[in-house]
Amino acid sequence: MSTESSAILKYIALGASDAVGVGTLQPTKDGWVPKLASLVNAQQTMNLGRSGSTLRDAMKEQLPKVLDQNPNIITIWLAVNDFNQQVFNPSILTNYKSDLNKMLSQLRTKLTKDTRILVGNIPDLSQVNIYASFGIPKELLSVRVKEWNDAINDIVQKNQCELVDLFAYWKELASHPEYISFDGFHPSSDGYTRLAEIFYQQYSKK
């Protein structure tokens, strides 16, 4: 376990509806961001997540609020909303890669080298039934998710950040349907607990 947790002063989360805690009855308590904040003993937590946010939205609305802060840990999970838009914009992955590189580069340049920047990738969406209900073949979904995750991994490593491999762990969903909320898409309180644990596992490696 990391010995840094007792020294954590500030934690900032960038994200979308998952960061807000959509899918639970008490988002400010049961979302994964407050649960991770508790695990790392954060004394200050700034949750900038906004429902529906894409990475480009976050570049405009969330990122500027981070650059004048001095956080010890930042989490970024901004991928699924962008991924879902490729139905309407086939070239979105190209734009996404450029934006992710810009975001991580700015954070790495503006903040201290000791700031932990943890970036989540795309979970195994073939385990989420709502995609099957739209008639999307699991094989095609898996190919697309791998393409996106390979790109995310490359950019995260390039900018000396840390990948949180949600895809590897989210295969658990097959045996834990309770991880998905009543809306069939967002995590439940149990799912958010598991997400917080996965982010914490990466954090604890240093």
Image (tube, rainbow, N blue to C red):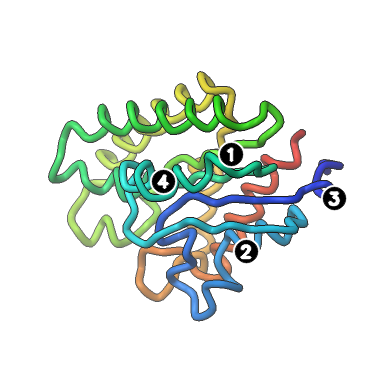
Q: Can you name the residue that lies furthest to the front here?
A: 68
Q: Which residue is mark 3?
A: 6
| Mark 2 crowd level (few <14, some 14–19, many ≥20, 10 Å Cα) | many
Horizontally, residue 51 falls left or right of residue 165, namely left
Amino acid of disc 4 = Leu
User: Quick one: SS at disc 2?
Assistant: helix
> Mark 4 or 2 closer to N-term?
2
Q: Which residue is mark 4?
A: 78
Q: Say if 157 sits above or below 191 in the image.
A: above
Q: Which residue is mark 2?
A: 34
User: Quick one: SS at disc 3?
Assistant: helix
Amino acid of disc 1 = Leu
**Image quadrant in which you'd find residue 98:** top left
In this rendering, the label closer to the viewer, 3 or 1: 3
Residue 123 visible from this viewpoint:
no
Amino acid of disc 2 = Pro
> Mark 4 or 1 closer to N-term?
4
| Mark 3 crowd level (few <14, some 14–19, many ≥20, 10 Å Cα) | few
Horizontally, residue 52 falls left or right of residue 68, namely left
Q: CA distance from mark 2 to mark 1?
A: 16 Å
Q: CA distance from mark 4 to mark 1?
A: 11 Å
Tell me where residue 109 appears, x and y as whole percent. Answer: 55, 25
**Image quadrant in which you'd find residue 3:** top right
User: Quick one: SS at disc 4?
Assistant: loop
| Mark 1 crowd level (few <14, some 14–19, many ≥20, 10 Å Cα) | many
